[in-house]
Image (cartoon, rainbow, N blue to C red):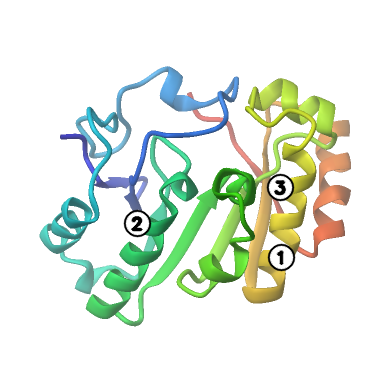
Amino acid sequence: MADIIYDYNGSTYINLTNKCPCRCTFCIRSNFDAIGSADSLWFKTEPTLDEIKKAVDDYDFTRIENAVFCGYGEPTNALDNLIETAKYIKTINPSIKLRLNTNGLSDLINEKETAELICSVVDSVSVSLNEPTSEQYDKITKNRFPGKAFDAMLKFTSDCVKYCDDVRMTVVDVIPEEDIEKSRKVCESTGAKFRVREYSE
């Protein structure tokens, strides 16, 4: 069984699924079987909610101030488990701050609007913007919704801003400075905050 809960750079992460509609050219899962304290982040079979809850119980979330839904897959590909896990962790530690790291394609993945539901159980949302145009975005993410993904991601982000006080969009510093500035303007159009992340191999 792969690690569901792991520590990385002093933070606690929750790995819910290996499913993802993207094959991003810079994704670290292409290079390593695990990061941080995890032995492996690759599931042989996707974890059930009961298995996720057991991992939560074994970790002791009562002492944790912050945790992030982020692993070797897109967390919203396991939307029901994401929602129920967030609720469960909050019953254990009501003051914990939960963040979702996402590609922002949840509405396409789940074929419905999901921002309000997600923001009802997490405290912050970080969306990977990656590139400033639809064409560039499709090229770098190699997603399975070409021509649709970029606009859907922007709409999801805008919707999250309506329901959550802390929403940000990020790009990785592997893209040119000019595209970073263009991405900043795209982000501003959604009402979200902007962050440039350092690439880590």
Distance between the alpha carbons at the discs numbered 2 and 1: 21 Å
Q: Quadrant of the N terminus?
A: top left
Residue 162: % across, % down: 71, 74
**What numbered label is drawn on residue 81?**
2
What amino acid type is highlighted by mark number 3? Met
Residue 164: % across, % down: 62, 73
Q: Is residue 47 visible?
A: yes
Distance between the alpha carbons at the discs numbered 3 and 2: 21 Å
**What numbered label is drawn on residue 172?**
none
Discs 3/2, front: 2
145 sits left or right of 16 in the view? right
Label 3 residue SS: helix
Residue 169: % across, % down: 69, 51
Q: Quadrant of residue 49?
A: bottom left
**What numbered label is drawn on residue 159?**
1
138 sits left or right of 92 in the view? right
Local crowd size for mark 1, using a 10 Å CA cut-off: few (<14), some (14–19), many (≥20): some
Residue name at image x 84 percent, y 33 percent: 179
What amino acid type is highlighted by mark number 1? Asp
Residue name at image x 39 percent, y 58 percent: 80
Tell me which numbered mark, 3 or 1, is placed earlier along the sequence: 3
Q: Residue furthest front?
A: 111
Q: Quadrant of residue 68?
A: bottom left
Q: Is label 3 in contact with label 2 (beta carbons under 8 Å)?
A: no
Residue 55: % across, % down: 17, 54
Q: Quadrant of residue 85?
A: bottom left
What amino acid type is highlighted by mark number 2? Asn
Tell me which numbered mark, 2 or 1, is placed earlier along the sequence: 2
Local crowd size for mark 3, using a 10 Å CA cut-off: few (<14), some (14–19), many (≥20): many
Query: Mark 3 — residue?
Result: 153
Local crowd size for mark 2, using a 10 Å CA cut-off: few (<14), some (14–19), many (≥20): many
